[in-house]
């Protein structure tokens, strides 16, 4: 019995050479309890174009880890071995563009329709130089048809309490978003998770069809598939405790185990494989026996492979040469094999392969070559969990399209989303109308007596505060609830972060500013602020500046804090603290010098100072006879409260500057957070 994929078991359109091959993959992580723990041990294999391959194993067997290693998405830990794409060392730039990864969670906008979701993916990820708009739409049509989604093209994705497409259809949309880019390898992490058996079967059936039609290699992890699903796979990779138990044609797996004395005892082969590979923790005796069985299976397969079975194992090199990184001798490498590909891509061990005591070496030539790689990928030499030196790839996907083009696609998408979720707009309009009525009528028709001084101050401070909380909290909530989609798109290099920020701000700004202009207009006339056209427009400019800064603050907070609940606590606390420096609750001149500088990073200070100066300058008040305090002019009020330190135009400008600084901070935080740092082979 041969376990190398023979031409008869490979799909008809599979080419002769593997699209992806890997040898002696080992992956270690450092844990608090167990120190360095091996997650994958000595894994070798290869997959071909047109094949549908399943990675199976019990929970914790290492399926997702192997998938991530092969997809070039593993972060942290220590990785070594050899992976080749189309027979040569992988270049992150080319490889990531040719590989599509469908995550377990379907992260999409619930309010977009199926067609809009696929179209946005095509518009953002297919280059304009190669594809016209109609080509992109044609692609979407093809994917809709191939994935049997045409009948739900106008249905919303749904989620968060909104009825949308079914779970199976949603998974197919996730797959479709990747397929519009026409990848060579499609990788799916648990595509059947959360689906009923018929939906799961349909997903597998369709991915098989896709693989055949597009000569696409599809690799997926899967939990206990039905017998019908197992029959659809071309190849199985069976893992137990991070070790290979079988890799080969799906239809030869049962005979392979039967040969070892394990005839199938279950009508579903998947259940049989899992039972066979699972360590039973029910009792010490059961554990000992099952561990022995698993070890025997692993040994049998390794031996089989050694005899020329499935994947050719790379020979361990002779360990003779010293190697250096950054001029420092850090270990030894073996004689380089004849093949230059191998020279380039193998990381050799100064011990036996599979032995966790061995140390990792980095071939100097490799690092140089990778550092000089074309494209935006960057290799950094870093220390890993065991203080060894490793290559870590910072992969930055190059932009697919021109900035303006992607910004317009994002803006259109944001507009559609805003139109369909009017709760933010209705909330802001309601809030502004209520505030207009209260601010207007509590401070109704302000006169020129001494009590109007206090009322003016109260009205303008309330106006300043109303421009922050009701804007920041809802906007932050909207951004944070779609942040996972942003991070997914960012990790795939779908667009530039600057276009995202620009589009998001452009879509939010008019929605926020319009109700506030109405509020200001109403309050201006009802409360009777100084009637003067110039003052009215200066007030509007000051209002726009603080709203811009508030939006920037919302963006920065959304990127700085991981959870929405925490953000909802931190935001009021930080705004409440900043409010102390506005110049209303404390005298701006009298704040203790250690903390006084805080007013210069306080959006309230600039906005409040701007509003107050705009209103009080030029006013004259009547004094109450016998009153202890009398402000004769508006200037007296400004002097007393220390609110005329900066001219109005500077207050407006500085709030715009603060807004830009918040946006810049949000941008840096996002880049840093979503920066993909991958261990690379
Ligand atoms: N970075 C890490 N740090 C510590 N342990 C890890 C890390 N990555 C993986 N593991 C451990 O490695 C083992 C394999 O994890 P992996 O997620 O690959 O398993 P799996 O087969 O996909 O499991 P499941 O089917 O339950 O998702 C698990 O025990 C997991 O806890």
Image: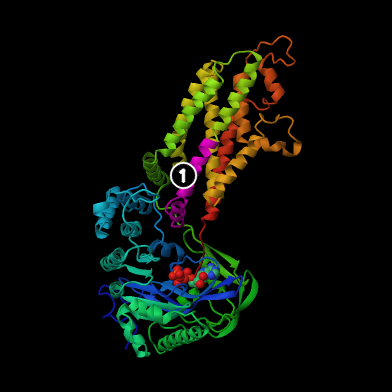
Farthest residue in the top direction?
A: 625
Residue at 50%, 68% (x, y): give it.
Answer: 680
Report x, y in % for residue 636: 70, 18
Q: Is residue 665 left or right of residue 186?
A: right
Report x, y in % for residue 283: 50, 82
Q: Nearer the viewer, residue 532 or 263?
A: 263
Q: Nearer the viewer, residue 431 or 16?
A: 431
Q: Which residues are magenta?
A: 469-497
Q: Quadrant of the N terminus?
A: bottom left
Q: Is residue 246 visible?
A: yes
Which quadrant holds residue 408? top left
Which quadrant holds residue 493? bottom left
Which residue position holds label 1? 478
User: How would you classify the magenta stretch by its main secondary structure?
Assistant: helix
* Element carrying mark 1: helix
Residue at 69%, 11% (x, y): give it.
Answer: 623
Question: Dot 1, how many residues are within 10 Å of its Cα: few (below 14), some (14-19), or many (20+)?
Answer: some
Q: Is residue 103 above or below residue 498?
A: below
Q: Magenta stretch: residue 383 in it? A: no
Q: Magenta stretch: residue 486 in it? A: yes
Report x, y in % for residue 649: 59, 27
Q: Is residue 309 above or below residue 473?
A: below
Q: Nearer the viewer, residue 99 or 172?
A: 172
Q: Is residue 601 above or below residue 5?
A: above
């Amino acid at each position: 019995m041969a376990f190398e994929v023979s031409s008869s078991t490979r799909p008809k359109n599979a080419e002769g050479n593997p699209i992806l091959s890997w040898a002696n993959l080992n992956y270690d992580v450092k844990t608090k309890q167990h120190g360095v723990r091996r997650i994958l041990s000595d894994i070798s294999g290869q997959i071909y174009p047109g094949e549908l391959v399943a990675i199976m194993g019990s929970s914790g067997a290492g399926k997702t880890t192997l998938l991530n290693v092969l997809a070039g998405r593993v972060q942290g830990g220590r990785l070594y071995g050899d992976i080749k794409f189309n027979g040569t060392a992988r270049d992150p730039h080319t490889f990531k563009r040719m590989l599509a990864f469908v995550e377990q969670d379907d992260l999409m906008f619930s309010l977009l329709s199926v067609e809009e979701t696929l179209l946005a993916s095509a518009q953002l990820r297919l280059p304009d130089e190669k594809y016209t708009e109609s080509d992109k739409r044609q692609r979407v049509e093809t994917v809709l048809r191939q994935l049997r989604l045409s009948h739900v093209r106008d249905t919303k994705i749904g989620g968060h309490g909104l009825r949308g497409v079914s779970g199976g259809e949603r998974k197919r949309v996730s797959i479709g978003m990747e397929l519009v880019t026409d990848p060579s390898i499609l990788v799916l992490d648990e595509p059947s998770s959360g689906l009923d058996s018929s939906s799961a079967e349909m997903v597998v059936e369709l991915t098989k069809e896709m693989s055949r039609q597009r000569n696409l290699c599809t690799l997926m992890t899967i939990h206990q598939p039905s017998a019908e699903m197992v029959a659809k796979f071309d190849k199985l990779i069976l893992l137990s405790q991070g070790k290979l138990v079988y890799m080969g044609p799906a239809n030869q797996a049962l005979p392979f185990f039967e040969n070892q004395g394990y005839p199938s005892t279950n009508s579903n082969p998947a259940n049989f494989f899992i039972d066979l590979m699972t360590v039973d923790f029910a009792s010490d005796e059961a554990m000992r026996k099952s561990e022995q069985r698993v070890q025997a299976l692993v040994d049998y397969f390794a031996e089989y492979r050694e005899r020329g079975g499935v994947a050719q194992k790379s020979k361990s090199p002779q360990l003779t040469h010293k190697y250096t990184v950054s001029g420092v001798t850090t270990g030894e490498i073996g004689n380089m094999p004849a093949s230059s590909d191998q020279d380039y891509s193998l990381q050799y061990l100064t011990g036996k392969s599979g032995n966790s005591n061995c140390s990792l070496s980095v071939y100097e030539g490799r690092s140089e070559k990778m550092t000089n790689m074309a494209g935006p990928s960057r290799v950094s030499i870093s220390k890993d969990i065991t203080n060894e030196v490793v290559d870590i790839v910072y992969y930055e996907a190059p932009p697919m399209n021109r900035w303006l083009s992607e910004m317009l696609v994002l803006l259109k998408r944001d507009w559609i989303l805003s139109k369909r979720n009017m709760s933010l707009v209705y909330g802001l309009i309601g809030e502004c109308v209520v505030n207009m009525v209260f601010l207007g009528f509590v401070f109704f028709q302000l006169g020129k007596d001494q009590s109007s001084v206090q009322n003016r101050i109260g009205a303008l401070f309330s106006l300043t505060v109303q421009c922050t909380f009701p804007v920041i909290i809802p906007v932050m909530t909207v951004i944070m609830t779609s942040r996972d989609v942003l991070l997914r798109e960012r990790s795939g290099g779908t667009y530039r972060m600057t276009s995202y920020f620009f589009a998001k701000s452009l879509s939010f700004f008019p929605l926020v500013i319009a109700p506030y202009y109405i509020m200001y207009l109403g309050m201006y006339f009802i409360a009777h602020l100084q009637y003067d056209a110039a003052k009215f427009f200066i007030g509007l400019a000051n209002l726009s500046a603080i709203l811009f800064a508030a939006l920037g603050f919302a963006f920065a907070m959304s990127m700085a804090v991981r959870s929405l609940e925490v953000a909802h606590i931190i935001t009021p606390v930080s705004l409440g603290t900043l409010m102390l420096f506005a110049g209303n609750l404390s005298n701006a001149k009298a704040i203790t010098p250690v903390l006084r500088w805080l007013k210069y990073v306080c959006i309230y200070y600039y906005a409040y100072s701007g509003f107050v100066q705009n209103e009080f300058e030029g006013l004259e008040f009547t004094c109450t006879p016998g009153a202890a305090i009398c402000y004769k002019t508006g200037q007296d009020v400004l002097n007393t409260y220390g609110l005329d330190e900066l001219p109005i135009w500077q207050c407006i400008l500085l709030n715009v500057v603060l807004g830009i600084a918040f946006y810049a901070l949000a941008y840096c935080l996002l880049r840093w957070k979503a920066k993909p740092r991958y261990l690379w082979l």
